[in-house]
Image (cartoon, grey):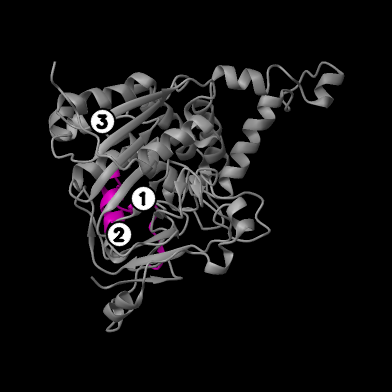
Amino acid sequence: MPNLDASSSTPRAPSAHDDEADRAQEPRADYSADDANDEVRNDGVGIVTPRDFVCAEPFTFKSGQVLPGFTLRYETYGQLNAARDNAVLICHALSGDHHCAGRHSAADRKPGWWDHLIGPGRAVDTDRFFVICANCLGGCSGTTGPSSINPETGKSYGISFPFVTINDMVRSQKRLLEHLRVEKLHAVIGGSMGGMQALLWAILYPNFVRRVLAMATTAREGAQAIAFNEVGRQAIMQDPAWEAGNYPPDGGPRVGLAIARMMAHITYLSDASMERKFGRRKRAAAEAQDSYSFDIQFEVESYLRYQGQSFINRFDANSYLYITRALDHFDLAHAYGSLERAFAPVQAETLVVGFTSDWLFPPEQNREIVLTLLRAGKRASYAELATDRGHDSFLLESPDLYEIVRGFLEREDEFVLDFSI
């Protein structure tokens, strides 16, 4: 397969030395061995460098549309073992990306989005596992998506980009793992949309995946979640700066995208967590006197506007449209005829974790996955954590979650179901 790692995010024509470059490219940690000291252990994986996997072969989407090639930006942590079977794939959620651990420079204000979970001695232990995380197809953090340049026009794809599904995301990740010459995945881990990808990995590649750990997820996007996504999309598309998806690289529907993010972010929280964090507290200027205006008065308003503004500086509006639509189309029962049929090929041991305060993908949707797997005779278990922090609980620091993840990944004995009475 003529693929390579490169600094460019634009697919290029294959060259004669591609195969040689692939053979010479040994999967490794994206941080130096010199960093493996006590200081870095206390600070996770340390400084990391993202890499680009460029696939120069055509890719056919589930829709039938075709790209001549694509790029996935990814990071790795830890070392691939001699058997090439200690890999753990991390799948990100809607607004996530490939940078799930470490820092890109010492000046970075924040580490990767799951840094507290991944690293030497942590729940996903990079002393034991080779951890991989890629920005999903259709994204905007170095991976090919609507903001990428269409080689036929020299301009951004915009909404001429092929429609993306969760299936497409998983199949493109499989090409990356083939390039890294991973023989088997020890586990696939993901929350929310990442959990959807994890489930589909076990369905599409049953002989390749040993364990699946899906959190705060669902086997089908429900009406409420679709409705929230549609409100966000309309906020973007009704912004005049959207320009039917053909906005310039330095422009776009910034107001619409900010509103979409503000609305979506509410669904990631819970009433209890918002009440505890903000209550009815007002900003100092508004506290001094009754303010009869539409300026920011309450702290929760300030927080949401900050979330919106910070999001538009790192995310592409068209990618938001494409990825939310991919979420809407995710329905395993519809795709396979029933959920039982969907899970028929699964060989991986599966653990699903739900959170009591998650009202976007509530516990019953997570339990349904496990119950269906068990009815199909598969190895599956369910854990539910009592928390008042909402859907985003899987992203927040939690010793209980750490123990669940560590125990599932590191347990040596094979999980066996006993149906005897």
The mark nearer the N terminus, 1 or 3, is 1
Q: Dot 2 corresponds to which residue?
A: 177
**Three-letter amino acid code at the position of disc 3:** Ala
Point 48% across, 36% down: residue: 402
The mark nearer the N terminus, 2 or 3, is 2
Residue at the limit of the structure toward the front, as seen here: 413
Q: Residues within 10 Å of mark 2 (few under 14, many from 20)?
A: some
Assign the N terminus to one quadrant of the image: bottom left
**Which element carries disc 1, helix, strand or loop?**
strand
- Give residue 280's position: percent from left, percent from top: 70, 16
Nearer the observer: mark 1 or 3; the answer is 3
- Give residue 411's position: percent from left, percent from top: 34, 40
Assign the C terminus to one quadrant of the image: top left
User: Does the magenta run of residues contain 331?
Assistant: no
- The span picked out in magenta is 153-174
Q: Dot 1 corresponds to which residue?
A: 89
**Three-letter amino acid code at the position of disc 1:** Leu
**Which element carries disc 3, helix, strand or loop?**
strand
Point 46% across, 34% down: residue: 403
- Seen from the viewer's position, the closer of residues 273 and 25 is 25
Q: Dot 3 corresponds to which residue?
A: 380
Q: Residues within 10 Å of mark 1 (few under 14, many from 20)?
A: many
